Image: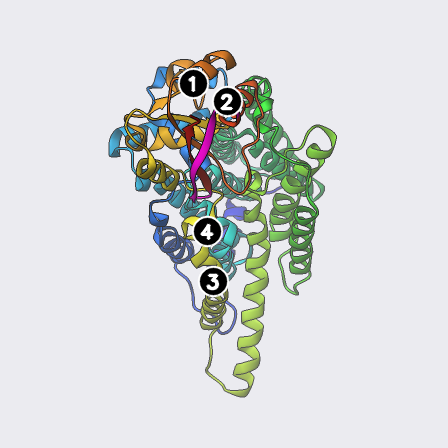
Amino acid sequence: MSLDLASTTLAGRGRATSPPPTGEHRWPAWLVPALPAALSLALGLWGLSRQGAIWRDEAATWGVAERSIPEIWHMTGHVDLVHGLYYLFIHAIFEVFGPHLTALRLPSVLGAMVAVAVTAATARRLAGPLAGVAAGLTLAILPVMQRYGQEGRSFTLVAAGVAVATWLLTGALDLTGPAGSTAARTKQRRRATELLRWTAYATVMLATTLLNWLALFALAAHGATVLIAGRNGQRPLLAWWLTAAVAIAGGTLPLIVASSRQAGQVAWIQPPSVGSLLGVAAMLIVALACTRVPGLPRGPRSPVAVGLPLLAVPHLGLLLASWLVKPLYVDRYVLFASIGLSLLAGPALAWVTRTLAARIRSRRPGRPRAEALLAVIVTFALLALLPLELSLRTPKSRTDDVRAAAAKVATVAHPGDGIVFIPAHRRDAALVTPSSFRGLDDLALAETAGPSGTLYGTEAAPADIRAAMLTHRRIIVLSDGGSAPVAATAQDRAKLAVLAQHFTPAASGDAGGRQVTTYERNP
């Protein structure tokens, strides 16, 4: 059977302009993404500074972004290549607006806003306007999205890229079909439109995987959606997607190969915990429950076909890789999977509000509308999450605060004192707030971070560190809080040995989740 593009377009227009269900307003197209985007922006700007606190991951971004482009390029040859494109992006932001917290975090706020808006537009395309608004609002209020929407890392930017690619994919589902015997000009027009859509999809997806190549799990999820469409007669769609996938994977492969040589960076990741497994299981159960909602659109262009793979494939794929290859599962690495959950929860929430509104109107005609009920539900959700939302916007919500630790050092140190960092990674406080360490002698540092092509600089040989420490009467030690410093390297063992044999702790205090201890030389 042939499929004429004109008839397809008319059918698509018919769906877009069909009357809304009883009790719903006719939503302007722009309003569907605009409402959730406004909420996401408001939540992102609320408490953005977090009282000036910066935690260790953001400190890495800050320290690298302040370097020159040649220094960033030199560093990515040794460490953190997987984040290289993001570091260059923040470097450009710092060059234009200067290095400060708003410049560091605002791209993540905007990334979350774009992800929310485009998710709403996608859900509108799949299940209608009310479902679109509900899906966008769901993504906006998710605590995990609120958290990483206020951090100077790439995770919400990756989510924004996946959201745009998903929107482009769902548009391609409408365009692609059997060619049949349509007119030659119509075929050419359709072919050109398909080429444009798939080129845009491949470009956006490639840029996203270059920000973080774990976004390839989203590409695999899209492949599952395409396979579902292929089983429903849209076989040309598979050829288009495979062509795009080859280009995306080929463009990302050099990054994967090169960054695999830096695998020691993720040695800190532990095997998936029971809590992580239960969290993934809970999300999948909620998603499967949403698929059972009556009246939910079915088929290749539906929330189930698009949202369920986008939720399940990244989480299950990363868990499988953690068991078969090496531990890699961290929820923020697949933050974009939350888009899949929202694409399922939004239509389900829309059905709930429509059903409740219909039942209430059967008793009290004329009120309320489904939109009003949706607003009430979202308001209650925000109020229920308020304690968590408030805690996310405090310095204590993160592992540590490098600025608080640096301020503590500045209050206890005297000019000419020595300072050592145990482990060396705690030198990040000096990279973010160098003024707090002015006048102190970094006794272990052999080469600074930029010239050495490392995140925190390279340290001298243990014997040299020992000799340098013995020339000082007072030494400040900045280490992790909560326990005694752990000697993970020969340099750290040398530091602890000298302190134990020749120095006595005079004062110690916790600041920003880190320990600042003053040692004085034994008589």
Q: Mark 3 belongs to which amino acid?
A: Pro
Task: Give the residue pinned by disc 2.
Answer: 498
Q: Is residue 220 above or below residue 360?
A: above
Q: Earlier in the sequence, mark 3 or mark 2?
A: 3
- Residue 495 or residue 360, whichever sits in front: 495
Q: Do tag 2 and tag 1 residues touch (Cβ < 8 Å)? A: yes
Real-space CA distance between mark 3 and mark 2, rounded to the nearest whole angstrom: 46 Å
Real-space CA distance between mark 4 and mark 2, rounded to the nearest whole angstrom: 45 Å
| Direction from residue 323 to residue 73 in the image, left or right | left
Real-space CA distance between mark 4 and mark 1, rounded to the nearest whole angstrom: 48 Å
- Residue 523 or residue 445, whichever sits in front: 523
- Residue 387's tag is 3
Local SS, label 4 = helix
- Residue 470's tag is 1
- Asked whether residue 509 is drawn in magenta, I would say yes
Q: Mark 1 belongs to which amino acid?
A: Leu
Q: Mark 2 belongs to which amino acid?
A: Val
Residue 466 at x, y percent in the picture = 47, 16
Q: Earlier in the sequence, mark 4 or mark 3?
A: 4
Local SS, label 2 = helix
